[in-house]
Image (cartoon, rainbow, N blue to C red):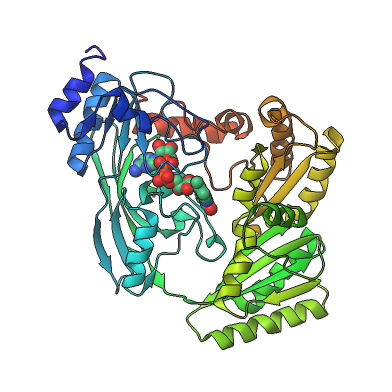
């Protein structure tokens, strides 16, 4: 079949309302959120049912047409953007957005892949339950995209990554077969856990159409402390104390340097210097529980009192009101946006064995300074789960296109050091097209071989999201 016949064939099988082919109609589906990648496609398919997904994929496989699954398009690695081949088909899940069931005894929710994460969190809250997956893009990203990238977010330290929140997956394989793994069982030790292969696969094995998710008791009482620390070593020791004393109530443990505070104060509105004096680094800790607020604050104050006495932090402020809690969080949440306002920069979403973070920070800084004394690192992230955003902004006086012209050498330094410390070059954003070459160079050869063999089993014709991940 010639590629010119193919959109007509898809339209005949699925209807004109489901298949977009006019260049103006498909243009918005061809670029990523950050505007870094732009590709080509001959059609965009927007199915409403699993059966429509199945028919679309079977047709694509028969014709050897590449398929790019697309969720909310908030991914940061270009995974949902088609490559330069004009024959691509983008398959969007946005119309498959029903909550199929919610069970407050089993504490599960079955949701279609196109459901917006924020909507699912609100649906769970209305049923007096918590869906703990939470990230800044939650009002745009879809649960299918969250599974496909194994998203992290701010609550990983307590609830784990997306894969720990999933009990079952329904997916369509490239040949159109439906993988019906939509179980809600807590216990199912019957062989290989195939759903886990689809989670984090970035659309390279099949199309996720629905997921059964774990729900938790609501933990609406929150208490936040911002503590000033001398060094990452102190942040680590403070984390150990907090975890020992507060256990499962530790909901977030975020770290940022003084340079990040400068950036936020310069670019974000309504943010204030947190202490009378400036300190080298800060950690923002959040406890959450269903107990009363006074008890939670008292526990946190006691721990902080001990920490000050044992010299595990230099200063601390406990949120006294909801407004103050939000003001403290703002210091952390505004960093990405402030860095964007500051100009082009290099993002490195890395993770490390948590106990190695202090040593890594020292040797990493020395390595970067040897390359450029003027480099400006902005280091922040989900310290409690070992994830740092080790971002670099252009040295003072450098050209605005510094990141594009010289960035690669700095990125190589960072990722090389991460690998040396036994860390990961991608903590929570995935690989997509952005990190594919580094991934292929740094992953263990045996792991890569096994991944390629798994890919061949699921997708022998190689039509699923070519050029991404592998
Ligand atoms: C402001 C902002 C903050 C963010 N914060 C975080 C954060 O804290 N933690 C974090 O982990 N990420 C974060 N992200 C990244 C992003 O939100 C996540 O990667 C998210 O999970 C992507 O979901 P999506 O629906 O937008 O997927 P998309 O971007 O549409 O797709 C991502 C990948 O999944 C594939 N895919 C999508 N849907 C399906 C499906 N149904 N079946 C098969 N494959 C599919 C795509 O082909 C692509 O490879 C952030 C992004 C932004 C813009």
Residue in the image at 73% along x and 63% along y: 282
Residue in the image at 38% along x and 63% along y: 121
Position in image of residue 204 (x %, y %): 40, 34
Is 220 situated above or below 100? below
Image quarter in which the N terminus is found: top left
Pick out the residue farthest to the front: 269
Position in image of residue 330 (x %, y %): 60, 62
* Nearest to the observer: residue 340 or residue 5: 340
Residue in the image at 37% along x and 25% along y: 462
- Compared across the picture, whether 216 is left or right of 286 comes to left
Pick out the residue farthest to the top: 2
Residue in the image at 76% along x and 53% along y: 259
Q: Quadrant of residue 443?
A: top right
* Nearest to the observer: residue 242 or residue 395: 395
Is 255 situated above or below 53? below
- Compared across the picture, whether 127 is left or right of 196 comes to left
* Nearest to the observer: residue 387 or residue 182: 387
* Nearest to the observer: residue 214 or residue 80: 80
Is residue 189 among the parts visible in the rendering? Answer: no
Q: Quadrant of residue 67?
A: top left
Q: How many marks?
A: 0
Quadrant of ligand 1: it is top left
Position in image of residue 313 (x %, y %): 79, 71
């Amino acid at each position: 079949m010639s590629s010119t016949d193919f959109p007509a064939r898809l339209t005949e099988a699925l209807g004109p309302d489901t298949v977009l082919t006019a260049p103006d109609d498909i243009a918005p589906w061809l670029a990523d959120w950050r505007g870094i990648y732009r590709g080509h496609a001959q059609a965009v398919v927007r199915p409403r049912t699993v059966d429509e997904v199945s028919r679309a994929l079977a047709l694509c496989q028969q014709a050897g047409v590449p398929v790019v699954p697309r969720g909310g398009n908030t991914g940061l690695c270009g995974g949902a953007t088609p490559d330069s081949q004009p024959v691509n088909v983008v398959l969007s899940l946005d119309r498959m957005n029903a909550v199929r069931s919610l069970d407050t005894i089993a504490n599960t929710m079955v949701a279609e892949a196109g459901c917006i994460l924020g909507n699912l969190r609100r649906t769970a809250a209305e049923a007096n339950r918590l869906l703990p997956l939470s990230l800044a893009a939650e009002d745009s990203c879809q649960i299918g995209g969250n599974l496909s990238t194994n998203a992290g977010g701010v609550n990983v330290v307590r609830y784990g990554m997306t894969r720990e929140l999933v009990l079952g997956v329904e997916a369509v394989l490239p040949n159109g077969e439906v993988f019906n793994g939509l179980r809600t069982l807590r216990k199912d030790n019957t062989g290989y856990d195939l759903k886990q292969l689809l989670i984090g696969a970035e659309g390279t094995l099949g199309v996720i159409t629905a997921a059964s998710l774990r729900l938790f008791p609501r933990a609406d009482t929150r208490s936040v402390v911002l503590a000033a620390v001398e060094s990452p070593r102190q942040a680590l020791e403070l984390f150990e104390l907090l975890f020992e004393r507060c256990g499962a109530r530790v909901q977030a443990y975020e770290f940022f340097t003084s340079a990040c505070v400068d950036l936020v104060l310069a670019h974000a509105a309504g943010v204030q210097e947190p202490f009378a004096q400036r300190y080298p680094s800060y950690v923002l800790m959040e406890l959450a529980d269903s107990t009363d607020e006074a008890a939670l604050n008292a526990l946190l104050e006691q721990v902080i009192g001990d920490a000050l006495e044992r010299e595990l932090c230099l200063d601390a402020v406990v949120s006294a009101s909801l407004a103050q809690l939000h003001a403290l969080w703002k210091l952390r949440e505004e960093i990405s946006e402030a860095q964007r306002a500051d100009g082009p920069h290099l993002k490195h979403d890395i993770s490390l064995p948590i106990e190695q973070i202090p040593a890594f920070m020292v040797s990493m800084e020395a390595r970067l300074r040897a390359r450029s004394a003027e480099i400006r690192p902005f280091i922040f992230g989900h310290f409690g789960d070992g994830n740092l955003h080790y971002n670099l902004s252009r040295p003072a006086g450098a050209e605005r296109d510094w990141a594009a012209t010289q960035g690669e050498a700095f990125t190589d330094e960072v990722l090389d050091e991460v690998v040396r410390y036994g860390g990961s070059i991608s903590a929570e954003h995935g690989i997509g097209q952005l990190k594919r070459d580094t991934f292929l160079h740094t992953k263990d050869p045996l792991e890569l071989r096994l991944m390629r063999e798994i890919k061949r089993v699921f997708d022998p014709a190689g039509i699923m999201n070519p050029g991404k991940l592998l």
